[in-house]
Structure formats: structure tokens, C-alpha cells
């Protein structure tokens, strides 16, 4: 273990030494800002920060701790003490050079807050909002009072101007009371507690803390710079923040979704959605800065709105996370560590005062947050976990201390004390939070929610983000639109309706058909919303007319990123053993999961039924599970009944030795289906039929029961034409009720006929 930890350090040492010597030589030669120095600084911060972060993670600590330590090691506290000339040359104090890397770090923290916002569950935050507000207020008032009192009793030697003791005390109180949303968010996310109720409360409280903190800083800044309180600036900050949040979560939510969708559907350049999101983040950060609140609030809110957009959030998260974790985070947190010169703590009196500051800050914040959690209705163990999590100060205090230093209300020694307090409390937070959470049992509701989220990560329906519906003017198209609305309504999935029935020259004549399908989708979505407690109940529908030949039109639309294509056309199968030519052209143009709707009987006379009686065959395969998921979603959305029948994927040869094993397998598959239905409160009836060909068993079950819709998960078979196998072909041709075939996107070989 020790060798594995040291190996990266040993391998990187020659590179780091060469970079250090080269950067030092350049630093001695350079008289102005240097690009070479900037690159050298970044290389050192990334190499040391990521290396120490790797080691910290192996000891159960978040990597951000290693990145903070990297800054301390490379700063005046260690590197500057051992080799001061080289440290000063590589990290010069000149404003021009420092501004270059500071700009990178500040933009990186905006990206980090964007990512944190994308992971924030607003519905859960709303549930814990009362607790978050109570914790934030109590968690600010108590440590603020402690810090202010400490400032009033500090020796005059530590104050730059004893006549300005009031302002210095206010700065001390602020520095002790505000949690760093940046540090808190990183630690909670890296420790995998973001989905816990406590983790959501901690992040929500830290956001409130940070917002209140910057309003307090605006007040103190006004007092320090003008000698009097400027109520106009204070009112601007408070009212501007409230207005910003109100607009963001109403009009802003809709606008962000529309911009993301427009960019994805219309721009052909590389990663257009990422570009739009970065522009949104920057714009909202500028707005919050202009109203007198720190820009991180705008980035965080932008992340929340992007995370609520159902289009491409997984891809966005994956692309951003790697860049932020490997580049921006080591730079930002490394610079935070560089700001502290711990060598001044060699003075015993200053060291004692710093220790007192850490104790007062920790006790005050911990006690205030604990009282706030109790007031917010949390249990004692939950309040302990919250108090532990809120004790991280980090970069927020570094920024506050820097402002105080630049304004002349904090001395260099006070600045170092505050930075040391921020680092110590930040490093103490992860083990405290981990210890508190290990003693915090999951409540029944939280356990059910986490199990459901873990289950849905592997599911098909729960991970749908966007659906494409290809329809003509037939009754079956209306029926397909109804099914699409039911599937999308429970989660607010955006739907694009592609009308394929007429060429582009007749678009104006085609408009009425588009609007009718849009209305059907929206009406079904409302019905789905009424049937489930947490359903959204509306979908955003875009209609398009075919601009090219059918296959080309589908291929062009598929480039925009759809998780499921539903097909509803008048003629589904031809007279021969094939699907209709239009269905085959549609399927050929789409490589992802495909759902073919074949309405029959009453569903063609009344294509918008109030409920379904669904039969779903299962076999234990992944594709049959996908069909079961779709069936459960439809049964839940339409308040219908669900009947599950086990069908074997192979012909039973009657081998006795395998009979008991096969029976156990069948019962297990049915139990899994029942568990799936139970998670969504859907009533289910299971049937087990043995020694019968699958198609025969399914057709018999249709006749023997009152089902009106068969939902089948099917494999897409490699063949000269569109094929889902003989069982699916028999059901869609011989069934007297409607059929919905749900296929995977992958091609499979034709199964052996004997099996």
C-alpha cells in the first residue's frame, strides 16, 4: 500500500523538479506577466494537487483536501521556507502575474458551482427548506456574535487601525459565520452524500449562508469605505437577489430549457449545448455580481436550471465533470492554500490566538447549526451531522479576508489567522461529517427514495430524457400520440412530433394534423400527472413536418438526440411476412430504442382510452425487462391493471433434471416483475405457463383475460428486413388487441430455431 502511494510521487518528481527549475529561471528573468510562468504554475498545482488528492482519497478523505494541502506545500509555508527565492520566482506577488491564474481559478469555481447546481434536487430542497433556513439563520447569528466579541477584545497590535475596531470586529464575525458553499458542495458530493436528505440540507443551507454572507459584506464594505451605512446599496443587494431568484425559477426555467433545446436541434457546430450552458452560467453570474451579490450564486442557480432541463443532462455532466475535476479544482483550491503563510504562526502568542479563533469558530458554527437543526424539526443525530457539515469555511473566508486586507481593516497577521482557521475547519469537516453520518440511520422514506433512485439508474424508462414520435394522419397515429403523452407526462419529457404523412410542400395543409397530435400528447400527459403524486403532468411538444424522404428525415431528426422513437402509422404490417415499407424505412433511420404501436379494435375507434388492461410477457432477459418497465409506466399513468405472464425464450424439451431449476428461474422473474410494479404502486397479477410455446401462451392469455394492450420487449434481429423474431411477429399479426413492441437499439443474431 505504501509503495503504491509513493510510486506516483517518485515518477512525477523529475518532471516537477524540471518544471520548478525552469519556472524559477523564467521568474528571475521576467519583469512582467509571463505565459511561461502561468503554465508552470498550473502544471505544479495540478500535479501536486491531484497527486495528494489521490493519496487523500485512499485514506477516505475527499481529494479537495489534497488540493488545499498542495497550495500550502507550494506556498510560503513550506516551499517558501525551504527555497524562498524559487517560490517567489514561480509564484510572484506581482498583481499582473497573480491576476492571470486568479482568473482561471475564479472561472473554475463558477463551473464547479454549475455542476453542483445540476446535482441539486429542488423537490428535495423544498421539502427541507424550513430546516435549511432555520439552520442558516442560527448558524450565522451564533458564530457572528462570537467572532464580533473576539474582535472587540483583540490586542491593538493585531489591528491595522485601532480606531476602526468596529469594522474589524464585523469582518471577524462574518469570517467565522459563513460556510463556504464551494467547499461544502465539493466535500458532500465527493463523499457521495449528495443524495442523502442531510446532504441536500447542508448544500441548501450553505447556499443561503453564502448569499447572506455577501449581503453582510456589502453592508460592512459600505461602512468601511464611507463611514456610514449606504442603505441604497443594501436594499439593491437584498431586493435584487430576491428578484433574481424569483425570475430564475419562473421565466428563467422555461427560457433555459428552450435555449438548450434550440441549440441542440438547430446548431451544427461541435458541442453547441455546452456553449449555450456556459453562456447562461456567465450571464447569470454577471447579473448576481451587478446586484451586489457574489457571482457564484448566479452560477449555482444556472446549474439548478440546467439540471432541471430533461435534455442531454447526463452527457453535459460527464463532459464537464472531468475537466473541472482534473483542471479547475486543483488550480482554485491550490491557490487558496497558497494564500496562507503559516510560518508566522511560529510566534507562540499568535499561534495561541489562532487556536482560540479556530475553537470559537468551530464551537460557534457547530452550536448554531445544531440549534438551527433542532429548531427546523430534525433529530439530534441529524442535527449533529448538519453541524459537522456546516463547519467548513474554505475559500469564502479566504475571499472575505482578502477583501478586509485590501481595505486596510485586517492586518497581515489577522489575515493569516483567518485563512488558517478556514483551512483547519475545512480539513476537519470530512471526518466529522463521515463519523456523524455513519451514526445516522436511514429513515424509511429516505431508504425507499435512495433504493428507488439506485434502481432507476439501471432502468430504461427512468432514464428517458427525450422522445420522438413519427406519425401520419391515421387513428393509430392518434393512439400512439396518446401512449407517448402517458409515458412523458409523469416526468415532463419533451416530445418532438414528426409528421411523416405528407411531403414538405403541403406543410400548411399539414398544420392542423400537427396541432391535433400535439393536443393528444398534452392531454395524455395531464392524465398521467393526475394519476401519480409526484408527476409533472405536462410536456413540451414540438411539431415538425417531413422535409426529405422518409428515411433521411428520420436520420436527420435522430441526430438531435432521442432516447426512444415511437412509430404510429396507419399500416404497420404488410400482407407478406414483413412490416410495412414505411415502418421499415423509419426503423432503418433510427439506431436507438424503437417502439412500434399497432392499435386494434376499440383503440382505433376511441384512440384515447381512459385506462389500459395490460399484458406483458417476461422471460428474464434484459429486453423483456424493458418491456415490463414500459408496461408499468403506462399502467401507472393510465391507472390501469397489469398482468404479467412468464414465457420461456427456449422451447421446453421436457428434461426432468432441468425442470426444478427452470421453475425457480420462472418464479424469480415473476417476483422481479412484481417488485418493479410495487415500486410504482401498480397492482399486478402474475401467470406462469409451462410446456407451451411463447406465442401460444401469450395468445391464449389474451383470449382468457380482458386485456386490451400487449406490451412486449423484443430484440431487433439482424436480417435483410425489419424483424423482431417469430414470437413478436405472431403476436402482432394474430392478436385481437393492440400491441406495443419495445425494442432495444442493438442488433441481435437470429436465434437458433431448435432452441
Image (tube, grey):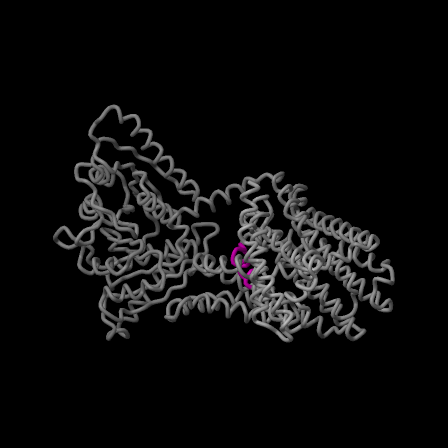
Q: Is residue 568 left or right of residue 319?
A: left
Q: Quadrant of the N terminus?
A: top right
Residue 552 x %, y %? 25, 66
Q: Main secondary structure of the magenta part?
A: helix
Residue 434 x %, y %? 62, 43
**Depth check, front residue: 3 or 310:** 3
**Depth check, front residue: 113 or 159:** 159
State yes or no: residue 121 in magenta. yes
Q: Is residue 456 left or right of residue 581?
A: right
Residue 475 x %, y %? 25, 59
Residue 637 x %, y %? 39, 50
Q: Is residue 270 left or right of residue 428?
A: left
- Write the residue at 48% across / 68% down: 255
Q: Quadrant of the C terminus?
A: top left
State yes or no: residue 703 in magenta. no
- Write the residue at 28% across / 64% down: 555
Q: Magenta region: which residues?
A: 111-122
Residue 107 against residue 433 in the figure, above or below = below
Q: Does any portion of residue 290 appear in the rendered image?
A: no
Amino acid at each position: 500500500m505504501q509503495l503504491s502511494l509513493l510510486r506516483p510521487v517518485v515518477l512525477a518528481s523529475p518532471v516537477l523538479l524540471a518544471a520548478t527549475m525552469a519556472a524559477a529561471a523564467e521568474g528571475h528573468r521576467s519583469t512582467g506577466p509571463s505565459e511561461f510562468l502561468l503554465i508552470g504554475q498550473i502544471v505544479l498545482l495540478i500535479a501536486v494537487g491531484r497527486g495528494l488528492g489521490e493519496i487523500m482519497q485512499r485514506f477516505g478523505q475527499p481529494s479537495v483536501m489534497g488540493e488545499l494541502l498542495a497550495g500550502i506545500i507550494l506556498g510560503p509555508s513550506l516551499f517558501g521556507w525551504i527555497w524562498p527565492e524559487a517560490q517567489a520566482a514561480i509564484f510572484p506577488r506581482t498583481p499582473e502575474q497573480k491576476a492571470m491564474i486568479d482568473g482561471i481559478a475564479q472561472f473554475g469555481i463558477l463551473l464547479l458551482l454549475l455542476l453542483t447546481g445540476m446535482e441539486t434536487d429542488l423537490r428535495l430542497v423544498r421539502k427541507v427548506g424550513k430546516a435549511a433556513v432555520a439552520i442558516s439563520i442560527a448558524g450565522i447569528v451564533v458564530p457572528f456574535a462570537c467572532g464580533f466579541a473576539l474582535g472587540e477584545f483583540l490586542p491593538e497590535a493585531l489591528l491595522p487601525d485601532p480606531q476602526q475596531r468596529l469594522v474589524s470586529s464585523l469582518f471577524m464575525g462574518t469570517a467565522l459565520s459563513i460556510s463556504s458553499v464551494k467547499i461544502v458542495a465539493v466535500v458532500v458530493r465527493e463523499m457521495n452524500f449528495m443524495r442523502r436528505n442531510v446532504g441536500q440540507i447542508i448544500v441548501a443551507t450553505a447556499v443561503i449562508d453564502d448569499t447572506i454572507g455577501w449581503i453582510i459584506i456589502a453592508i460592512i464594505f459600505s461602512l468601511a469605505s464611507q463611514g456610514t451605512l449606504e442603505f441604497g446599496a443594501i436594499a439593491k443587494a437584498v431586493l435584487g437577489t430576491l428578484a433574481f431568484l424569483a425570475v430564475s425559477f419562473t421565466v428563467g426555467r422555461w427560457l433555459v430549457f428552450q435555449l438548450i433545446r434550440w441549440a441542440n436541434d438547430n446548431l451544427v457546430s461541435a458541442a453547441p449545448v455546452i456553449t449555450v450552458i456556459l453562456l447562461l452560467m456567465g450571464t447569470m453570474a454577471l447579473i448576481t455580481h451587478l446586484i451586489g451579490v457574489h457571482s457564484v450564486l448566479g452560477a449555482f442557480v444556472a446549474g439548478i436550471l440546467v439540471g432541471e432541463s430533461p435534455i442531454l443532462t447526463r452527457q453535459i455532466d460527464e463532459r464537464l465533470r472531468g475537466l473541472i475535476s482534473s483542471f479547475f479544482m486543483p488550480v482554485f483550491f491550490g491557490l487558496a492554500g497558497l494564500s496562507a503563510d503559516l510560518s508566522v504562526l511560529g510566534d507562540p502568542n499568535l499561534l495561541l490566538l489562532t487556536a482560540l479563533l479556530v475553537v470559537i469558530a468551530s464551537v460557534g458554527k457547530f452550536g448554531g447549526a445544531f440549534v438551527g437543526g433542532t429548531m427546523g424539526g430534525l433529530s439530534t443525530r441529524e442535527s449533529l451531522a448538519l453541524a459537522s457539515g456546516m463547519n467548513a469555511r474554505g475559500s469564502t473566508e479566504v475571499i472575505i479576508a482578502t477583501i478586509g486586507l485590501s481595505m486596510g481593516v485586517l492586518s497581515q497577521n489577522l489575515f493569516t489567522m483567518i485563512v488558517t482557521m478556514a483551512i483547519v475547519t475545512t480539513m476537519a469537516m470530512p471526518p466529522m461529517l463521515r463519523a456523524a453520518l455513519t451514526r445516522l440511520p436511514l429513515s424509511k422514506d429516505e431508504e425507499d427514495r435512495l433504493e428507488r433512485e439506485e434502481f432507476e439508474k439501471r432502468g430504461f424508462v427512468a432514464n428517458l430524457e427525450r422522445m420522438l414520435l413519427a406519425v401520419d394522419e391515421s387513428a393509430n397515429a392518434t393512439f400512439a400520440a396518446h401512449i407517448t403523452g402517458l409515458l412523458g407526462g409523469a416526468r415532463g419529457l419533451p416530445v418532438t412530433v414528426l409528421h411523416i404523412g405528407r411531403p414538405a410542400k403541403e406543410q400548411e395543409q399539414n398544420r392542423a394534423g400537427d396541432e391535433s397530435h400535439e393536443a393528444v400528447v398534452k392531454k395524455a400527459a395531464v392524465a398521467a400527472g393526475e394519476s401519480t403524486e409526484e408527476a409533472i403532468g405536462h410536456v413540451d411538444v414540438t411539431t415538425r413536418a417531413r422535409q426529405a424522404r422518409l428515411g433521411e428525415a428520420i436520420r436527420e431528426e435522430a441526430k438531435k438526440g432521442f432516447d426512444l422513437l415511437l412509430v404510429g402509422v396507419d399500416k404497420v404490417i404488410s400482407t407478406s411476412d414483413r412490416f410495412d415499407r414505411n415502418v421499415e424505412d423509419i426503423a432503418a433511420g433510427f439506431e436507438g430504442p424503437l417502439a412500434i404501436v399497432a392499435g386494434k379494435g376499440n383503440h382505433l375507434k376511441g384512440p384515447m382510452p381512459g385506462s389500459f388492461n395490460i399484458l406483458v410477457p417476461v422471460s428474464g432477459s434484459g429486453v423483456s425487462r424493458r418491456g415490463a418497465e414500459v408496461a408499468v409506466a403506462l399502467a401507472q399513468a393510465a391507472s390501469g391493471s397489469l398482468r404479467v405472464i412468464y414465457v420461456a425464450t427456449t422451447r421446453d424439451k421436457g428434461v426432468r433434471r432441468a425442470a426444478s431449476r427452470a421453475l425457480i428461474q420462472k418464479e424469480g422473474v415473476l417476483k422481479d416483475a412484481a417488485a418493479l410494479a410495487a415500486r410504482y404502486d401498480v397492482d399486478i397479477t402474475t401467470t406462469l405457463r409451462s410446456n407451451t410455446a411463447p406465442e401460444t401462451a401469450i395468445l391464449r392469455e389474451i383470449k382468457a383475460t380482458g386485456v386490451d394492450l400487449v406490451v412486449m420487449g423484443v430484440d431487433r434481429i439482424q436480417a435483410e428486413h425489419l424483424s423482431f423474431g417469430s414470437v413478436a411477429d405472431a403476436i402482432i399479426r394474430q392478436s385481437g388487441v393492440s400491441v406495443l413492441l419495445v425494442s432495444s437499439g442493438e442488433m441481435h443474431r437470429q436465434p437458433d430455431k431448435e432452441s
